[in-house]
């Protein structure tokens, strides 16, 4: 990526729109040049978040509608609100183009639909790619949603949730802010009567973050940036010019499916956000079927786990070993 070749006025305008976080009243893409420069920069960072979410699903061997096993049936993918189409491309690349019959793209902007379809055809020459037009009844297959929540009006959100109920599976990634994460939790609560919760939720019950006392917390994770990113002069210059910390990639996400797959092992817990390191111990926020709670691990109890919790960007689901209300060790619940 060469920062000198980027359309900086377009990027500055788009970033201002994104930071505003208001519902979109009209398409903000002015043409293919906007989409191309966005796809090489902001969309690529979103792609890193998708990579992190999809890596866990891939390690579990997950495929839409199949739980922990593969499926022989090819299904369509719908990248709704596609923008430049980075989410749809990342999903197909990670889960395998051979598992999908068609990629359908939709966006309010005709320019975005055309751009996303063109990039997908170039990336997957053997895959049928088409622009999608909803007749109100057609199944959505695998519904892919990326960074759309804060751009939706209340009626548009209701329409999107109705569309989601027609899907076999839903993969949804959003910014990892408190406000947007809380909105995604509300979506989870609406859809959990229709879908099995694949990830990141370690249980199928009501979200523990909605209980009294947890309003300050939110469900978010951190994606690791690409290896050697800080050695890439182009990305370093982009980050400096755009005022972005390229190493910080917080995201919130949901993976939903039907029919239900295998439930998580009993006692499975997720670390929300980052663990805080102190002298001699780490403190973390744990989410499990038992609720959301702050837990501590003393360094002397499990030195290897102490280092892992304090230094890793992403954490697998755990089953905690406890004594006297503190963590004494952990077993990985599953690799996802």
Image: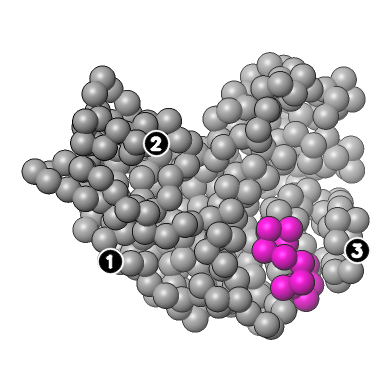
Q: Which residue is disc 3 drawn over?
A: 125
Q: Judge depth for marks 1 and 3 and give the one in front.
A: 1
Write the start and end of the magenta stretch as one range: 91-103
Q: Residue furthest left?
A: 324
Q: Are marks 1 and 2 in contact (CB under 8 Å)?
A: no
Count of numbered tags: 3
Q: Is residue 98 magenta?
A: yes
For label 3, the SS is loop
Residue 267 placed where, x, y %?
A: 26, 61
Q: Residue at x 32, y 53 (%)?
A: 331
Q: Residue at x 16, y 41 (%)?
A: 326
Q: Residue at x 56, y 68 (%)?
A: 62
Q: Which residue is disc 2 drawn over?
A: 308
Q: Residue at x 72, y 73 (%)?
A: 99
Tell me if residue 93 comes above or below residue 164 in the rendering: above
Q: CA distance from mark 3 to mark 2?
A: 41 Å
**What secondary structure is the stretch in magenta mostly built from?**
helix
In screen coordinates, is 51 left or right of 263? Answer: right
For label 1, the SS is loop
N-term mark: 1 or 3: 3
N-term mark: 1 or 2: 1
Q: In the rendering, which numbered label is found on residue 303?
A: none
Residue 192 placed where, x, y %?
A: 41, 70
Q: Which residue is disc 1 drawn over?
A: 266
Between 163 and 254, which is closer to the camera in this rendering?
A: 254
In screen coordinates, is 38 left or right of 276? Answer: right
Q: Is residue 35 magenta?
A: no
Q: Judge depth for marks 3 and 2 and give the one in front.
A: 2
Q: CA distance from mark 1 to mark 2?
A: 23 Å
Quarter-wise, where is residue 22 in the image? top right
């Amino acid at each position: 990526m060469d920062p000198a070749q980027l359309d900086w006025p377009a990027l500055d305008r788009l970033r201002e729109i994104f930071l505003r976080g208001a519902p979109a009243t009209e398409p903000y893409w002015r043409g293919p040049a906007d989409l191309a420069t966005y796809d090489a920069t902001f969309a690529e960072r979103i792609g890193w978040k998708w990579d992190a979410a999809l890596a866990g699903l891939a390690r579990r061997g997950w495929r839409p509608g199949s739980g922990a096993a593969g499926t022989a049936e090819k299904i369509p993918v719908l990248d709704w609100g596609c923008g430049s189409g980075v989410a749809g491309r990342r999903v197909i690349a990670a889960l395998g183009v051979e598992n999908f019959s068609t990629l359908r793209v939709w966006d309010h902007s005709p320019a975005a639909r055309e751009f996303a379809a063109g990039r997908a055809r170039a990336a997957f020459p053997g895959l049928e790619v088409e622009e999608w037009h909803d007749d109100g009844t057609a199944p959505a297959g695998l519904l892919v949603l990326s960074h759309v929540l804060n751009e939706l009006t209340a009626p548009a959100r209701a329409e999107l949730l109705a569309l989601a109920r027609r899907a076999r599976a839903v993969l949804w990634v959003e910014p990892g802010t408190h406000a947007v994460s809380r909105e995604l939790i509300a979506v989870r609560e609406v859809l959990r009567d229709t879908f099995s919760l694949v990830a990141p939720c370690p249980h199928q019950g009501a979200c523990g973050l909605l209980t009294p006392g947890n309003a300050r917390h939110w469900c978010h994770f951190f994606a690791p940036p690409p290896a050697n990113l800080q050695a890439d002069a182009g990305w370093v210059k982009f980050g400096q010019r755009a005022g972005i910390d390229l190493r910080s990639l917080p995201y919130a996400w949901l993976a939903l499916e039907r029919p239900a797959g295998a439930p998580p092992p009993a006692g499975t817990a997720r670390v929300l956000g980052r663990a805080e390191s102190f002298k001699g111990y780490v403190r973390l926020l744990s989410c499990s079927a038992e609720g959301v709670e702050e837990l501590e691990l003393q360094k002397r109890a499990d030195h290897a786990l102490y280092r892992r919790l304090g230094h890793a960007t992403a954490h697998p689901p755990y089953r905690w070993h406890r004594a006297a209300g503190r963590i004494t060790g952990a077993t990985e619940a599953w690799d996802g």
